[in-house]
Amino acid sequence: MRGEVYYKLVDIRNRYGEQVLGQICQDLLAMSFVEIGCRPEGISVHNIEGVDIIIDDDNFGRYAVEVKTTSGTKVTLGEKDHDGLKKYSNNNYRPLLAILKIELLRDWIFVDGNRLNGSGILYVDRLYTDARYKGIAEKINRAFENLLIRQYHEILNRGQSYLKEKLRDEGIRYSGG
């Protein structure tokens, strides 16, 4: 991520805390999928229970995305996270673990959920975007940065409530928090 984006994320984290920053990043990620061509009505965002983002779009594909953000070196994939990805995989969705380390020159990493051997601690610096998702990852990272830059002031002033409104205005299904 560019310096400008990193410092905006740090400002948001300083204002709202690590957990809310994670939810904000998740909401921006869902909106990024729309920016790269997914129909908004094909996206569901869940901020409380289950897999975080579900995409069911005839043209874009079917994905189940578990989202993690960190300022540290590791993330925890809970048992419910792993089981949720596995459940969707069994129903013909592509399971993805999307990880954003809040650090200069870092981008979203998209790990194929079928490669995950269970729940536990994952060290971010040992993870990489699978080759089959590199094209999507490049587009998502650009879209995420552009969305954050455009909406930064509203996010900083109104937090996640602003993004809830934006998701619903765009036609993305939203539940939780």
Image: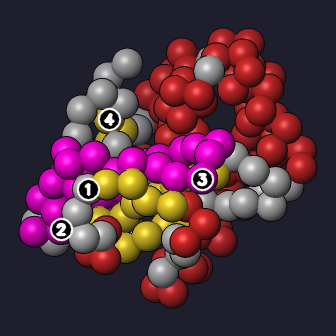
At horizontal 48% and vertical 81% (from top left) the residue drawn is 130
Q: CA distance from mark 1 to mark 3?
A: 17 Å
Quarter of the picture containing the C terminus is top left
Which disc, if any, is residue 27? none
Which residue is the site of mark 4?
46
The answer to whether any part of residue 139 appears in the image is yes
At horizontal 34% and vertical 43% (from top left) the residue drawn is 52
- Left/right placement of residue 164 relative to residue 2 reads left
The answer to whether any part of residue 54 appears in the image is no
Q: Is residue 164 above or below residue 138?
A: above
The residue type indicated by label 4 comes to His
Quarter of the picture containing the N terminus is bottom right
Which residue is the site of mark 1?
119
The residue type indicated by label 1 comes to Ser
Which residue is the site of mark 3?
73
Viewer-nearest of discs 4 and 1: 1
The residue type indicated by label 3 comes to Thr
The x, y position of residue 30, in whole percent, is 48, 46
For mark 1, does the 10 Å Cα neighbourhood hold few (<14), some (14 to 19), or many (20 or more) residues? some
Q: Nearer the viewer, residue 44 or 169?
A: 44
Viewer-nearest of discs 2 and 3: 3
Magenta segment boundaries in residue numbering: 61-90
The residue type indicated by label 2 comes to Ser
The x, y position of residue 59, in whole percent, is 36, 71
Query: Which element carries disc 1, helix, strand or loop?
Result: loop
In the rendered image, residue 88 lying in the magenta stretch gets the answer yes
Q: State if disc 1 and disc 4 touch (CB < 8 Å).
A: no
At horizontal 16% and vertical 63% (from top left) the residue drawn is 86
Earlier in the chain: of badge 4 and badge 3, it is 4
Which disc, if any, is residue 89? 2
